[in-house]
Image: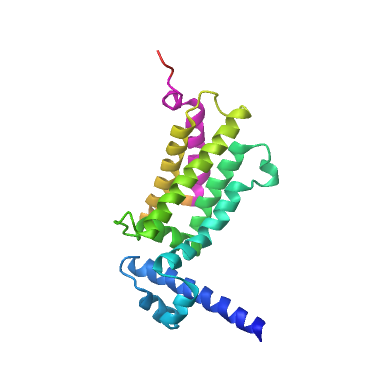
Amino acid sequence: MARSTKEEALETRSRILDAAEEVFYARGLAQTSLADVAVAADVTRGAIYWHFKNKSDLFDAMCERVRLPMETLMATPAEKFAGDPLGHLRNSWIYLLQDASANVRSRRILDIIFLKCELVDRNDPIWVRQHQCYLDGLANMERILKEAILLKQLPDDLDTRLAAITLHSHVVGLLMNWLFSPSSFDLAAVAAPLIDTCLDSLRYAPALRVKKED
């Protein structure tokens, strides 16, 4: 009986997350209430509060469906990329872009994150969480770039902070442009060459070198 109850609770939680994804995608985050999610999930508001503290908690759990696989991929390279941090970084970004193109859930959640959050209050828990994810992503990318320098995959004088900002801006900009207009280009097809272009800029762009003091 206990096992059945636990399975039912997990099924209800999953149904709520599915409903939140659908409603946030259709209406945007700011225009959606927990009551709207309850109706879409065919549960009571009490059932939502049993699983999630508030809308911020629900939104965060929905985002984790995309974040967790990506964070795991970024943190743990596949065996073929052991000792190859730059190849690991390339593989991770290409995976993100191609998964967004092929995976309906990933595409919807990324669309909500980038285009439908309407965040204006910097004290909003959702804004705070999104901001921290951005900072964590930059820090993780810079760590990988520093590992690549140690292994002579990148120049010793690469400005890793500037390089991480540049790479992040290129990739996120590409993703946002595609989410805004998916028919304008084939994201899966351009993912590899555009990521390679970004990585080439880290190797060769003079503007990404640490400035020497006079």
In percent of width and height, residue 104 lies at: 49, 64
Residue 205 lies in the magenta stretch: yes
Q: Nearer the viewer, residue 22 or 130?
A: 130
Asked if residue 73 can be seen in this view, the reply is yes
Residue sitting at the far bottom: 1
Quadrant occupied by the N terminus: bottom right
In percent of width and height, residue 90 lies at: 56, 41
Vertical order, 209 against 103 (above or below): above
Quadrant occupied by the C terminus: top left
Residue visible at 44% across and 50% down in the picture: 132
In percent of width and height, residue 45 lies at: 41, 80
Vertical order, 144 against 159 (above or below): below
Vertical order, 102 against 153 (above or below): below
Question: How many marks overall?
Answer: 0
Left or right: 211 in relation to 193: left
Residue visible at 45% across and 61% down in the picture: 109
Residue sitting at the far right: 79
Vertical order, 30 against 77 (above or below): below
Residue visible at 45% across and 68% down in the picture: 58
Dominant SS of magenta comes to helix
Residue sitting at the far top: 214
State which region is magenta. Answer: 188-211
- Give the colour scheme of this rendering: rainbow
Q: Quadrant of residue 183?
A: bottom left
Q: Nearer the viewer, residue 139 or 188?
A: 139
Q: Nearer the viewer, residue 196 or 64?
A: 64
Asked if residue 181 can be seen in this view, the reply is no
Residue 200 lies in the magenta stretch: yes
In percent of width and height, residue 198 lies at: 48, 36
